[in-house]
Amino acid sequence: GLGFNIEGGLNSPLGHRPISIKKLHRGVFCAMWHIGDVIVSVNGTAMEGMTSVQAWNHMKTLTDGEIKILVLKKKKMN
């Protein structure tokens, strides 16, 4: 796996929301990403307009090698 779980997307139980990180597992991304960060694109494919199942299915098709994931950091509340 890629080391994280996702939530949101088109037709989400919580309404239409961006695909975001729901849970992080141990690994490289834990230091860079946080729960709630939005996944904008994966290897150039936009996540906007996808259901969480469609987004996850796309990520599962990725082959070994370099994977580019564009993440929008969640704003911190003071």
Image: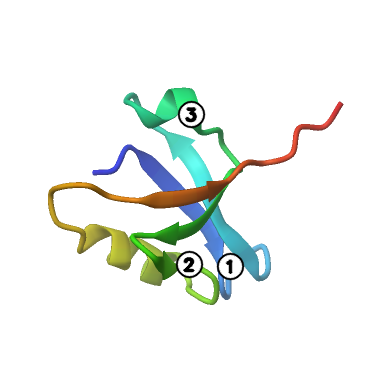
Task: Give whichever of 45, 11 is nearer the camera.
Answer: 45
Residue 26 appears in which quarter of the rendering?
top left
Residue beneath the point at 32% across and 37% down: 3
Badge 1 element: loop
Task: Give whichever of 66, 59 is nearer the camera.
Answer: 66
Residue reaching furthest to the left: 64
Q: CA distance from mark 2 to mark 3?
A: 20 Å
Which residue in the protein does label 2 denote? 47
Residue beneath the point at 58% across and 75% down: 11
Which residue in the protein does label 3 denote? 32
Question: Do the residues bearing badges 2 and 3 touch, measured as CB atoms within 8 Å?
Answer: no
The quarter of the picture where the C terminus appears is: top right
Task: Please provide percent x and percent y for residue 51.
Answer: 48, 72
Badge 2 element: loop
> Alpha-carbon neighbours of circle 2 within 10 Å: few (<14), some, or many (≥20)?
many
The quarter of the picture where the N terminus appears is: top left
Residue 34 appears in which quarter of the rendering?
top right
Q: Is residue 71 left or right of residue 45?
A: right
Which residue in the protein does label 1 denote? 12
Q: Is residue 35 above or below residue 56?
A: above
Q: Is residue 34 above or below residue 51?
A: above
Task: Please provide percent x and percent y for residue 73.
Answer: 62, 41
Residue 43 appears in which quarter of the rendering?
bottom left
Q: Earlier in the sequence, mark 2 or mark 3?
A: 3
Question: Mark 3 belongs to which amino acid?
Answer: Met
Q: Earlier in the sequence, mark 1 or mark 3?
A: 1
Q: Is residue 43 left or right of residue 40?
A: left
> Alpha-carbon neighbours of circle 1 within 10 Å: few (<14), some, or many (≥20)?
some
Question: Do the residues bearing badges 1 and 3 touch, measured as CB atoms within 8 Å?
Answer: no
